Amino acid sequence: MITNKICQTCGRTIQWRKKWKNCWHEIRYCSIQCRKSKPKDLDRKLETAILEILNHKSINATICPSEATRLIFKEEGWQKHMERTRQAARRLLESGKIEILQKGKVVDPSTFKGPIRLRKRVH
Ligand SMILES: [Zn+2]
């Protein structure tokens, strides 16, 4: 059975393609660009920052991903690192740690557009 996978870099769904039928088990990135920019220490720090900020809030609180971006990229120009933070958020979503919301509703991590909020996932 073929199941979709999640890109190890951007956290978006990788759609199965026929050209990958013999190597699907090896596919881990959705694009050459993602394969070239595998998560590094800084990206793991962004994941940790998101979780730590959420841990300091009440259980149903939501945060803007920019809080984590600012924590890691203290200098001016943190805005240009927002996509990196969104990628970290998608990876955390995939590992079941957080939810990604827009207007209070859970959104598809692969297709959302515009501002998002993050919330700790509670079981
Ligand atoms: Zn990707």
Image (spheres, rainbow, N blue to C red):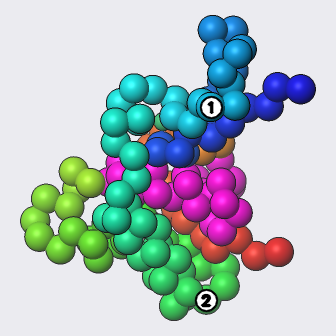
Task: Give the residue displayed 26% in from the left and 54% down from the top.
Answer: 81
Q: Which residues are magenta?
A: 82-107
Q: Does the magenta segment cover residue 55? A: no
Q: Nearer the viewer, mark 1 or mark 2?
A: 1
Image quarter (top left, top right, bottom left or bottom right) of the N terminus:
top right
Residue 97 in the image: state x and y as whole percent: 66, 68
Residue 91 seen in this snapshot? yes
Label 2 secondary element: loop
Q: Does the magenta segment cover residue 106? A: yes
Task: Give the residue displayed 57% in from the left and 36% down from the top.
Answer: 28
Determine whether 89 is above or below 14 in the image: below
Determine whether 88 is above or below 53 in the image: above
Q: Going by the image, does 1 lie left or right of 21?
A: right
- Mark number, residue 112: none
Q: Which residue is mark 2?
A: 58
Q: Nearer the viewer, residue 68 or 6?
A: 6
Residue 9 in the image: state x and y as whole percent: 46, 45
Label 1 CB-ligand 1 distance < 8 A: no
Q: Nearer the viewer, residue 55 or 117?
A: 55
Q: Which residue is mark 1?
A: 26
Residue 92 in the image: state x and y as whole percent: 58, 61
Q: Going by the image, does 63 lie left or right of 15?
A: left
